[in-house]
C-alpha cells in the first residue's frame, strides 16, 4: 500500500513555465514532508522540506504548498528551466523514527 | 555533499550467489538506511539502522539482511540473489530522530543486475 501518492508520473513544461507536482497522504501522524530531486545516475538530493505548522515554504524558484485538512502537498517550480529536468520525489515521515515514505516519482522535462 | 560512499557502483552476478553492498559515511550520523529503487515504485525501504548493532526491517526486507558493526559502515547482504532483486540500491544517512525528523542524504547508488 502506497503511503504517499504522487502525480503526475511525467510532466513536460515549456521553459519559463510553472511545473506543479502533487502528493497526497492518509496518515495524519506524518510531520515532515521533504521533496527530493534526482538526476540520472545520481542519488536523490534534498530540494526543500516543510512541516505541517506552515502552509507554504519558498526557496528561490521552488515552493511547497501544504494543505493539512486535505492531506495534500505540492511542489511548484516557477520559471522552469531545462536544468530542472529530473525526477522529483515527495516523501513523508513521522517523528520519532525518521522512516521516510516516498511517492513513486515524477519525471519532469523542461523543453527550451 | 554528504560524505556517503557506496561500493561497488555496479555489479552483475548470477542467481543464487551471495552479494554484499557496502555503505560508508564520514558524517558520524546515527541513522543509516538501505532503499531499492524500481520503476513505478519509487524508493522503498529495505532495512535501517539507528545505531551500532541496532537494525530494523523496512517494507521490503524479505531476502535481505544487514549489519552495522561500526558507526560509519552499513552492509546490505543478499544471501542468495534472485532476479527480482535486480534494482538500484541507495544508501541514505540521517542525524535525525529525537524531537523532530531530519532530512535523509543519499549516496549515488549501486546498480545490481542478477542474471
Image (cartoon, coloured by chain):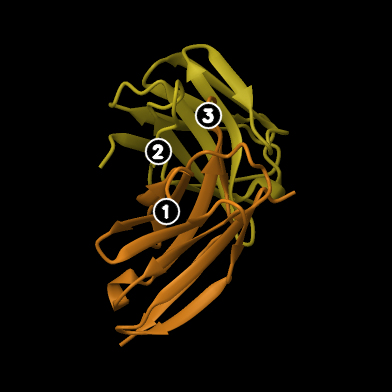
Residue A91 position, x and y percent, is 52, 48
Q: Position of residue A50 (x, y in %)?
A: 42, 47
Q: Is residue B113 visible?
A: no
Check if mark 3's residue and mark 2's residue have beta carbons within 8 Å: no
Is disc 3 in the same subunit as disc 1? yes
Residue nearest the viewer, comparing B3 with B87: B3
A14 left or right of A69 in image? left
Element type at marker 2? loop
Marks 3/1: CA distance? 19 Å
Instruction: Give me the residue at 64% from left, 61% from top.
Output: B40
Residue pictured at 46% horizontal, 82% vertical: A12
Seen in the picture, residue B67 relative to B100 is either above or below; the reply is above
Left or right: residue A27 versus residue B52 is right
Q: Which residue is mark 2?
A: B103
Sequence-earlier tag: 3 or 1: 1
In the image, residue A17 sits, relative to residue A58, either above or below, namely below
Q: Could you tell me how far apart the alpha carbons at marks 3 and 2 are, in whole angstroms?
A: 12 Å
Residue designated by label 1? A36
Q: Who's the residue at 64% across and 45% down the image?
A: B14
Q: Tag 1, which chain? A: A
Chain identity for the colour orange used in the image: A
Question: Quarter of the image containing the C terminus of chain A?
Answer: bottom left
Q: Nearest to the eye among marks 3 and 2: give it.
A: 3
Residue drawn at (70%, 37%) of the image: B16
- Of the chain colours in the picture, the one used for chain B is yellow
Amino acid at each position: 500500500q502506497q503511503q504517499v501518492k504522487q502525480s503526475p508520473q511525467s510532466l513536460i513544461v515549456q521553459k519559463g513555465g510553472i511545473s506543479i507536482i502533487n502528493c497526497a497522504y492518509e496518515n495524519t501522524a506524518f510531520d515532515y514532508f521533504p521533496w527530493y530531486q534526482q538526476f540520472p545516475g545520481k542519488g536523490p538530493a534534498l530540494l526543500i522540506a516543510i512541516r505541517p505548522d506552515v502552509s507554504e515554504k519558498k526557496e528561490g524558484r521552488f515552493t511547497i504548498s501544504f494543505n493539512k485538512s486535505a492531506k495534500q502537498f505540492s511542489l511548484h517550480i516557477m520559471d522552469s528551466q531545462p536544468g530542472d529536468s529530473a525526477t522529483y520525489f515527495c516523501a513523508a515521515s513521522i517523528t520519532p523514527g525518521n522512516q521516510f515514505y516516498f511517492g513513486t516519482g515524477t519525471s519532469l522535462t523542461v523543453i527550451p | 555533499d554528504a560524505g556517503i560512499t557506496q561500493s561497488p557502483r555496479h555489479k552483475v552476478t548470477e542467481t543464487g550467489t551471495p552479494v554484499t553492498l557496502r555503505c560508508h559515511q564520514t558524517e558520524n550520523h546515527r541513522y543509516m538506511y538501505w532503499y531499492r529503487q524500481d520503476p513505478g515504485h519509487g524508493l522503498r525501504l529495505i532495512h535501517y539502522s539507528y545505531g551500532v548493532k541496532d537494525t530494523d526491517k523496512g517494507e521490503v526486507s524479505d531476502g535481505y539482511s544487514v549489519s552495522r558493526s561500526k558507526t560509519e559502515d552499513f552492509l546490505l547482504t543478499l544471501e542468495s540473489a534472485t532476479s527480482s532483486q535486480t534494482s538500484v540500491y541507495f544508501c541514505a544517512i540521517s542525524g535525525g530522530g529525537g524531537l523532530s525528523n531530519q532530512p535523509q542524504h543519499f549516496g549515488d547508488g549501486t546498480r545490481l543486475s542478477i542474471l
